[in-house]
Image (cartoon, rainbow, N blue to C red):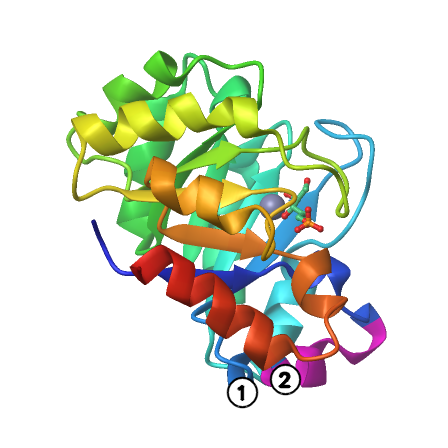
Amino acid sequence: APAAKIAPSMLSCDFACLASEAERMEKAGADWLHMDVMDGHFVPNLTIGAPVIESLRKHSSAFLDCHMMVSNPADYVAPFKKAGASQFCFHLETARDTWPELLRTVKDAGMRVAVAIKPGTPVEDVFPLVEHDPPVDMVLVMTVEPGFGGQKFMPEMMPKVEVLRKKYPELDIEVDGGLGPSTIDTASCAGANCIVAGSSVFGSSDPPATIAALRKSVVG
Ligand code: DX5
Ligand code: ZN
């Protein structure tokens, strides 16, 4: 399986100190920073947009894994590229007919492209995107209903991860929602290698140790 990527979710950070929180996570061993973009429409919560990514980019060279919980992802490609996003992960539920063009647009803009599925969306629905030319670089299997941090991990999503890992041994597979030391083994055994963790890392008294523990489970 591909290398482990531990991605603290900045949704759980102190937004008033975003640059120092990002630096703290990088020093703690984060591979990626997971940026939860919510439009108050696709999900019942409103977080950050391109201006915040642009501000953070001036203070950080980190890989910014942008999780686009927005109803019209195509409208965000150019602004996010300009702001300095590294990966653009759209939800399949928002691009049922438009994903081929969206995929191409994101790749042409020079970002990594990924597709996310909500708990109710069957895994088979992403197969065409992984087999497309160009293919998605990553599939995100949501392990909570998107919208909020601090929810309970849904182990019943693991068959989706298992199917993807078996079918696509080299694919980056990300899990997001309720990941921490008590749930990581379930996700890593299923085959996930990109791990988003918000409340477990930011709520930890020792974030470097928590990140190291997550990484050890994915590698081991
Ligand atoms: C939920 C977000 C997640 C969330 C994860 O909609 O996509 O990235 O921040 O937070 P935890 O790890 O606390 O479940
Ligand atoms: Zn997320």
Q: Is residue 156 left or right of residue 134?
A: right
- Mark 1, Cα crowd under 10 Å, few <14 / some 14-19 / many 20+, is few
The part of the chain drawn in magenta is 16-24
**Does mark 2's beta carbon lie closer than 8 Å to ligand 1?**
no
Q: Amino acid at mark 1?
A: Lys
Q: Could you tell me residue 46's position as x and y percent?
A: 81, 43
Q: Which residue: 65% across, 44% down?
A: 178
Q: Position of residue 179 (x, y in %)?
A: 59, 49
Considering depth in this image, is 155 or 32 the residue closer to the camera?
Answer: 155
Asked whether residue 109 appears in the rendered view, the answer is yes
Is residue 167 inside the magenta stretch? Answer: no
Q: Is residue 23 magenta?
A: yes
Characterize the local packing of mark 2: few (<14), some (14-19) or many (20 or more) Cα atoms within 10 angstroms. some
Q: Secondary structure at mark 1?
A: helix
Please say if 207 is above or below 127: below
Asked which secondary structure carries label 2, the reply is: helix
Residues tagged 1 and 2 counted as in contact (Cβ below 8 A): yes
Q: Position of residue 12 (x, y in %)?
A: 75, 60
| Residue in the foreground of this view, choosing between 210 and 8 | 210
Left or right placement of residue 55 versus residue 41 in this view: left
* Residue 31 vertical placement versus 184 (above, below): below
Which residue carries the number 2 mark?
24
Q: Badge 1 is on which residue?
A: 27
Magenta segment, principal secondary structure? helix
Residue type beneath disc 2: Arg
The answer to whether residue 65 is above or below residue 41 is: below
Residue positioned 63% across, 42% down in the render: 177
